[in-house]
Image (cartoon, helix red, strand yellow):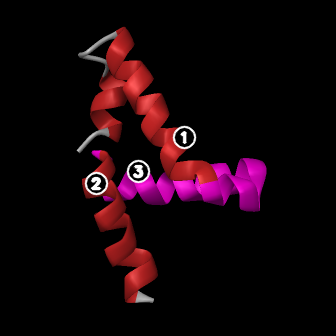
């Protein structure tokens, strides 16, 4: 339980420049929207959204919330 709920989001968030809470929120959101497929692609999809938002405006408040 510790590995899945605490350690894994922290490691993924550090490597992809996402906050751990955003990893968990993206798991919940994309899993709710697309089911199992959403759970598989939620972190890369959220990271891609973050990169696109940073390219459009470097001071975007949504990107600031997503990034660590």
Can you give x and y, in whole percent of width and height, for residue 45 in the image?
Answer: 54, 40
Is residue 19 among what the camera can see? no
Say whether residue 24 is left or right of residue 35: left
Residue 4, by quadrant, is bottom left
Residue underneath mark 2: 15
- For mark 2, give the secondary structure: helix
Q: CA distance from mark 3 to mark 1?
A: 12 Å
Mark nearest the camera among 3 and 2 is 2
Q: Which mark is residue 12?
A: none
Q: Residue furthest top?
A: 56
Of pointers 3 and 2, the one earlier in the residue sequence: 2
- Cα–Cα gap, marks 3 and 2: 13 Å
First to last magenta residue range: 17-40
- Verify whether residue 51 appears in magenta: no
Q: CB atoms at circles 3 and 1 under 8 Å apart?
A: no
Q: Position of residue 61 (x, y in %)?
A: 31, 23
Q: Which residue is mark 1?
A: 45
Dot 1 falls on a residue whose secondary structure is helix
Instruction: Give the residue at x 23% y 45%.
Output: 68
Q: Residues within 10 Å of mark 3 (few under 14, many from 20)?
A: some
| Image position of 44 (left or right of 13) | right
Quadrant in which the N terminus is drawn = bottom left
Which label is found at residue 22? 3
- Position of 4 relative to 13 (above/below): below
SS for callout 3: helix
Q: Determine whether, in the image, residue 20 is placed left or right of residue 39.
A: left
Residue 4, placed above or below residue 11: below
Q: Earlier in the sequence, mark 3 or mark 1?
A: 3
Tell me the quarter of the picture where residue 39 sits.
bottom right
């Amino acid at each position: 339980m510790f590995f899945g709920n605490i350690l894994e989001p922290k490691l993924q968030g550090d490597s992809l420049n996402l906050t751990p809470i955003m990893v968990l929120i993206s798991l919940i959101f994309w899993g709710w929207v697309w089911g199992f497929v959403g759970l598989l692609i939620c972190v890369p999809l959220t990271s891609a959204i973050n990169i696109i938002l940073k390219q459009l405006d470097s001071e975007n408040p949504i990107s600031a919330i997503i990034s660590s």
